[in-house]
Image: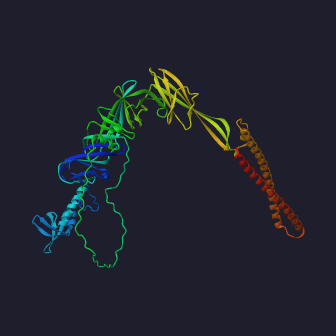
Amino acid sequence: MVVFEVNEVTLYKMGIGWLSSQASFKDKEVSFPVLVKNQDDFLKTFHVDVTGDIMLSSIAFDTEESKDLEIDHDRDALTSIINILSGSRVTVDTKDEKNIEGKLIGYQIMDACEEASRLEIILMTDDYKIHHISSNDLQNILPQEEFFKKTILEQIDLLSKSKKENVKNIKINFTDEGEKDVTISYLSELPAWLSSYRIYNIDDKNAVFELWSLVTNNSQQDWIDAKIHLITGLPLSFRYDISSPWIIDRPFVQRPKQMGINVMTPEADYDMKPKVMPSTAPGRGAARMKSAKKMDRLVGLAEEPVAELYDYAAVSEDSAEVITTTESIAFSLKQLVTIKKGESALLLLHSAKIPKETINIYNQHQHATHPFKAIEVENTVGYGWEAGPVTLYEKGIYAGESMLPRVTKGDKQILPYLVEQDIMIKQEEFTTTKKIGISLSNQYYVETYLNTKTFKLELDNKSDEEKVVIAEVPKQYGYKINKKKMKLDSTETANFFRTKITLEPKTTIKVEVPTERKTSESVSIASISDEYLDELLKLETLKANQISILKKIKQLRKEKYKINEQVDSEQSNLNRIDNEYQRITESIKVLTSEGDEAKTRSKYVERMNNLFETMEEKRKLLEKQQTRLDEIDEEIYKILDDL
């Protein structure tokens, strides 16, 4: 049996790996085990490299999905086999008799009163006799027909596959037998490798930086003395069903019920000799890659000289070579690594000296009364740091932990790792809002406000050493540091304002961080009050035409107020007259046309007619006044367009 050993592993940060396995053998066909979940990735990405004159012929795999397992291997294996052989010709041996030939009809379960149920097979011999053979007496059953022998073998094969259903053997065929070295490379789902860091404080200005990686082997093979490459890049990769048969639905055409076929008389002789097709050599594996070009493939670049493509630098002499590109970083471990399946390993990738500064950083949301001791490190190693946990050591002793975000080369990063209990800090927050101005902006009256938020900190250094504290206060949208009032240096991050404060030994100081922002509220001039309109007219920044327009608007608004007062008065009178009209109408309904009632009725009718005429006049007046109000609004908006 040929066993392929994994000799090279390339892992990416997004859950895939490129595996290379190698074996030497003479066989014409070998089996290569692949996890079922990785079968499609293997088939769409595999690369076979063959040395010598022998070439790759084909790669085959089992796509049979229609066969069902009929052997019940858990409880009733014998009855399952009897069901498969039912109707076939068999030879049966019992304890008392050998070579009983006949056709197996089936089986039945016999119930006995004093003993457990027992199985009996039913066999019909050539003389048409029906035999009942107890399973206790049965020695063996031999199938006689080839079809049923093949069926039993297929079922046993399916049973074997069901026991190891997570692995499928890919059959790799070659053109001939003979000694050959074969390397099979393919994509596989593998756990993403993880970055982990160590920082050892040496002195006040320097630290030793170590990059470790956690690698997990959950493949079906051990990695014995394998070359390991770890890539930070994120190549595009996807799942694709390439292994299952692609059945295309075709239209069904009804065949004709009757066909008339004409007899064809050849008009010329036909050359019936088979044509000789030009010989085509079967496809062979690609030429072996040189080791210098393997790394090109790892980072997804064309096969060109390494020196022309990479800013190559062997950063570490005892762990890994580092190849950086604009897209990724490749760590190629110099030593061979063994990681057995189901195991994980921590691998040291790089170690270097980096500059650092010890500081304390305070954030009230992280700790209300104490800052965190931290170091500010500079990435001078020549490549970007991936995100991951970092453990810090002082004098060789564990000091604390932090989370390192992604840091590009040349950048600095603050890493808090320990609560500094020698420094006590109190922080308070004060806010104010003040109107600082009004203005005219197109058709709007604008009020401007100054919002201030001042953070007051009291810092108490109880130690005998000078301490440097970076105080972080939250930054809200639109707020900026008031540089005129700010007495200390400050910087701005995405979420915080940072102030650097130096604390003398055994001292307490107070610091203010003043921040401010301007906001504004606008209202259409058409809807503001006369008081606001008067405020606008007092502005010294107004131009002559703006003053003229605002005064005209004010005059139109006075006319509008006057008309509104008239409308209210006329509407009140109209309502009163209408009430009197309704009352007289009700009175007329109860008066008769005879005697004194007739005289009273006549007076009411005359009064009602007079009231009706008065109401009509007032309604016309109200309509005229409403028309004027609409005209005034249109004039105001038309005038506003000239601002």
In the rendered structure, the answer to whether residue 468 lies left or right of residue 19 reads right
Q: Nearer the viewer, residue 442 or 421?
A: 442
Residue at the extreme front: 268
Quadrant in which residue 203 is drawn:
top left
Q: Nearer the viewer, residue 154 or 464?
A: 154
Can residue 159 be seen in the rendering of this structure? yes
Q: Residue at x 67, y 37 (%)?
A: 438
In the rendered structure, the answer to whether residue 4 lies left or right of residue 255 reads left
Q: Position of residue 616 (x, y in %)?
A: 81, 60
Q: Nearer the viewer, residue 276 or 234?
A: 276
In the rendered structure, the answer to whether residue 464 lies left or right of residue 289 reads right
The number of numbered discs placed on residues in the rendered structure image is 0
Colouring used for the render:
rainbow
Can residue 117 be seen in the rendering of this structure? no
Relative to residue 591, is residue 493 depicted above or below?
Answer: above
Relative to residue 429, is residue 609 depicted above or below?
Answer: below
Q: Position of residue 126 (x, y in %)?
A: 13, 73
Q: Position of residue 512 (x, y in %)?
A: 55, 28
Quadrant in which residue 20 is drawn:
top left
Q: Position of residue 224 (x, y in %)?
A: 24, 41
Query: Quick one: quadrant of the C terminus?
Result: top right
Relative to residue 264, is residue 613 depicted above or below?
Answer: above
